[in-house]
């Protein structure tokens, strides 16, 4: 009885906690709200670049945010910015900086615009999104610029209207949305016409800050990000699903029809009463009955077969564990890099499943070189993946992309591979 009372007293003093990056933050009026920059990405080239690689306005000191292994593998490079945003304080036409546009700068801007690059920002762990027209549909980031007509003057979106949505909580204000309306305006007074991409021109980077109250609570602020472009994507997905289903049904019906006709012909030949001549001559087995000789024949390379079986089980269990964790809500999108972390760690720890299944299969095939089997299971599939990953990373690093994996991260991956898999 005393033990139960002590346990109840201990439980009464327990407090709930939030995962890192998931805990809500209550802001007071006038409190600074950090706007962080991530990268510059494009769906056309799939090569993201570091934000400050290009001539944007920079803070006095660039500071990198602490990132986990999953964020680094995903190519995220989160850094601070010079934007001054205060809770519930609207601002209009704030000058950030004015920079000259050299020949190299103009060339880079035109290349980014032609390849449809967008800028990715983060406010209170929420990605800044752009609303498409007047529909409740959002896209990640905001475009760097555009072209008036194909082959004509490029213009730069040098003015950002930052719209922040907040929900009033009893302890303060919580940010539940971050939108942006990019504009192209000339000069520090934020007036038309558009800012052209010309050599020698002075580009003034300006911004507005607009705060709006929202009835959405903090727990549902990620809903619109999870349903981005649902007006188009759902239609495309359903079309692909129906198309694939019809193709599978037609192919299955054709194969079943061929098999049924073949089996029916073989059954009629095997079941009929043999004649005197057929009794005198030993009937030769033909058709589907010849398959049993191949089914029970051992493979020529039992070790390679066992390694492939073990690696297949490893991938299957890894996928099952990751999908289960994601379905249960443990891999929240607000906790960046959690999905990639789950993939890497589950793959490494499921090496035990690969070793066990490969050993069982190899023993069933009466194999004896179990020590070689251990080495092949540990090195074959992960080694091939690592070599391909290393070659691709060299290409990405040569292009100067921010998704290139640093050397230290490679050392961490190799350590996980050797220390846990072995």
Image (cartoon, rainbow, N blue to C red):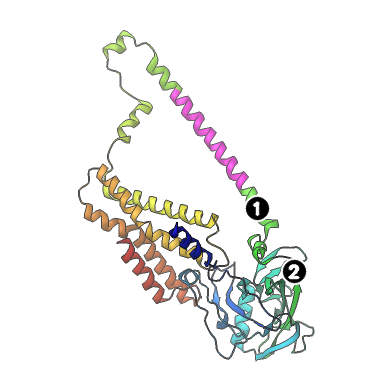
Q: Is residue 28 magenta?
A: no
Of 383 and 173, nearer the camera is: 173
Q: Is residue 8 above or below residue 287?
A: below
Q: Which mark is residue 214?
A: 2
- Picture residue at 46% right of the left edge, 65% below the top: 341
For discs 2 and 1, the disc positioned in front in the rendered view: 2
- Picture residue at 32% right of the left edge, 58% below the top: 380
| Residue 128 x %, y % | 65, 72
Q: Is residue 242 magenta?
A: yes
Q: Tell me the distance, in whole angstroms, between the alpha carbons under discs 2 and 1.
A: 31 Å
Outermost top residue: 276
**Which residues, given as a range, are shown in magenta?**
241-263
Of 57 and 24, nearer the camera is: 24
Residue 78 is at least partly visible in this image: yes
Q: Is residue 287 above or below residue 191?
A: above
Most frequent secondary structure within the magenta stretch:
helix
Q: Residues within 10 Å of mark 1 (few under 14, many from 20)?
A: few
| Residue 137 x %, y % | 71, 63
- Picture residue at 50% right of the left edge, 57% below the top: 325
Q: Which mark is residue 281?
A: none
Of 156 and 219, nearer the camera is: 219
Q: Which mark is residue 236?
A: 1
- Picture residue at 41% right of the left edge, 22% below the top: 266
Q: Earlier in the sequence, mark 2 or mark 1?
A: 2
- Quarter where residue 83 is shown: bottom right
């Amino acid at each position: 009885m005393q033990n139960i009372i002590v346990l109840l007293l201990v439980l009464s003093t327990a407090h709930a906690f939030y995962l890192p990056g998931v805990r809500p933050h209550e802001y007071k009026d006038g409190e600074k709200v950090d706007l962080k920059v991530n990268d510059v990405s494009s769906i056309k080239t799939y090569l993201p670049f570091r934000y400050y690689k290009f001539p944007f306005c920079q803070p006095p000191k660039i500071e990198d945010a602490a990132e986990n292994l999953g964020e680094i593998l995903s190519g995220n490079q989160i850094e601070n910015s010079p934007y001054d945003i205060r809770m519930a304080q609207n601002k209009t036409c704030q000058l950030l900086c004015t920079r000259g546009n050299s020949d190299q700068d103009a060339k880079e801007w035109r290349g980014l615009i032609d390849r449809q690059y967008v800028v990715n920002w983060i406010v209170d762990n929420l990605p800044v999104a752009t609303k498409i027209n007047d529909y409740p549909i959002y896209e990640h980031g905001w475009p760097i610029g555009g072209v008036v007509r194909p082959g004509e003057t490029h213009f730069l979106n040098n003015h950002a209207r930052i719209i922040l949505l907040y929900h009033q909580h009893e302890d303060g204000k919580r940010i539940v949305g971050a939108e942006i309306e990019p504009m192209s305006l000339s000069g520090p007074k934020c007036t038309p016409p558009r800012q052209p991409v010309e050599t020698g021109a002075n580009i003034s980077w300006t911004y507005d800050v607009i705060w709006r109250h929202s009835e959405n609570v903090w727990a549902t602020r990620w809903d619109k990000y999870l349903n981005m472009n649902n007006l188009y994507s759902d239609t495309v997905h359903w079309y692909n699903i129906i198309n694939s289903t019809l193709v599978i049904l037609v192919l299955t019906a054709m194969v079943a029809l061929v098999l049924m006709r073949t089996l029916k012909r073989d059954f009629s030949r095997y079941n009929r009463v043999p004649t005197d001549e057929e009794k005198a001559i030993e009937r030769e087995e033909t058709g589907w009955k010849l398959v049993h000789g191949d089914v029970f024949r051992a493979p020529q390379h039992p070790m390679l077969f066992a390694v492939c079986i073990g690696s297949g089980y490893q991938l299957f269990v890894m996928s099952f564990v990751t999908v289960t964790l994601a379905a249960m809500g443990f891999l929240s999108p607000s906790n960046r890099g959690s999905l990639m972390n789950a993939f890497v760690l589950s793959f490494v720890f499921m090496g035990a499943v690969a070793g066990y299944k490969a050993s069982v299969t190899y023993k069933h095939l009466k194999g004896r070189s179990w020590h070689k089997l251990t080495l092949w299971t540990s090195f074959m599939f992960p080694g091939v993946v690592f070599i391909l990953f290393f070659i691709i990373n060299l290409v990405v690093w040569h292009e100067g992309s921010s998704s290139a994996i640093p050397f230290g991260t490679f050392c961490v991956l190799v350590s996980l591979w050797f220390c846990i898999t072995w």
